[in-house]
Image (cartoon, rainbow, N blue to C red):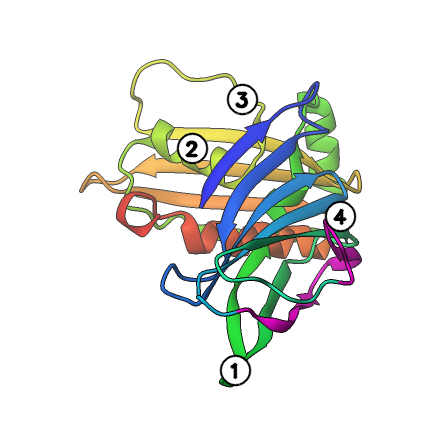
Amino acid sequence: MKNLKLKDGDGVNKINRRIHQLTGFSDPVYAEAFVTVHGHDIVLDITIINRTKQTLQNFVMELIIKGGLEIVELKPVEDPQNNTLAPESNKEIKVKLMVVSTDTGVICGNVVYETSNGEKTVVLSEICFDVGDYMSPAVCTDEAFRTLWAELEWKRKVDVDTEIQDEKEFLDHIIKLTNMKCLTAPLEGNCGFLTANLYAKSVFGEDALVNVSIEKKNKGTLGGSIKIKSKSQGIALGLSNKISLKQKGKGGN
């Protein structure tokens, strides 16, 4: 999957674009989606290619939307009444969605069509949107951070478990993973420990706070904890789950 992030202003109106392959190259129907995430809005520009020598009749793309998403519009870009797909031709379909919560959103489905050999179905791979897609780096003062930390009710803690052995490299990995802003000035040299505060806002204006505390162990590995606080349960759980799954870095992503 290829990613391209474009920032508008301070990042609050960040545009995130990526290409997601929906079927395999060996499938009779190839499909891929150009995904654009901008605030509350998600647009899928889907290209479907008939790789066979047959005309596909009664061609339908069925999508199932789960989690914090709602479908706004789904239609072919050209000639909505045409439900056939000629041999080795393509069809463009635009899908518009709205983010209604910071819960993980999932899009899945299939393509159904008929040939001279009967009805066929090709299953589409899932497109997932996690809390990182709905967060934008933001800035606040140290005093405001401490006040929010005391006020926000939802909290989670993740123990550091990573293959990364450099404290700064691990912090950069967590910043990229969570799409947050580091509020702590970078430290010079190698002192064997590191503490940093991270901050971001969701597309709904909800605050997300993270405190990263890392120390170098005797064997060169890193230990410590990552604490998360938010007003929203979905953000706190989403961030903790994402960090737990992907914090290893290197071979463990």
Name the N-terminal-most of marks 1 and 2.
Answer: 1
Rendered image: mark on residue 184: 3
Name the N-terminal-most of marks 1 and 4.
Answer: 1
Q: Position of residue 218 (x, y in %)?
A: 20, 40
**Crowdedness of circle 3 by 10 Å Cα count: few (<14), some, many (20+)?**
few
**Which type of secondary structure does the marked residue at label 3 adopt?**
loop
Rendered image: mark on residue 231: 4
Q: Position of residue 65 (x, y in %)?
A: 69, 65
The segment highlighted magenta reads: 55-81
**Crowdedness of circle 2 by 10 Å Cα count: few (<14), some, many (20+)?**
many
Front of the two marks 1 and 4: 1
Residue lying furthest top in this view? 188
Mark 1 to mark 3 CA distance (whole Å): 65 Å
In the figure, residue 41 lies in which quadrant?
top right
Q: Position of residue 215 (x, y in %)?
A: 34, 36
Residue 69 is a magenta residue: yes
Amino acid type at image mark 1: Ser
Residue 43, visible in the rendered structure: yes
Mark 2 to mark 4 CA distance (whole Å): 23 Å
Left or right of 159 in this view: 92: right
Mark 1 to mark 4 CA distance (whole Å): 56 Å
Mark 3 to mark 4 CA distance (whole Å): 22 Å
User: Residue, x 29% and y 40% (percent of image)?
Assistant: 164
**Which type of secondary structure does the marked residue at label 1 adopt?**
loop
Against 241, is 209 above or below? above
Question: Residue tagged by mark 1?
Answer: 116
Front of the two marks 1 and 3: 1
Amino acid type at image mark 2: Leu
Prevalent SS, magenta region: strand
Q: Position of residue 247 (x, y in %)?
A: 40, 47
Amino acid type at image mark 4: Lys
Name the N-terminal-most of marks 3 and 4.
Answer: 3
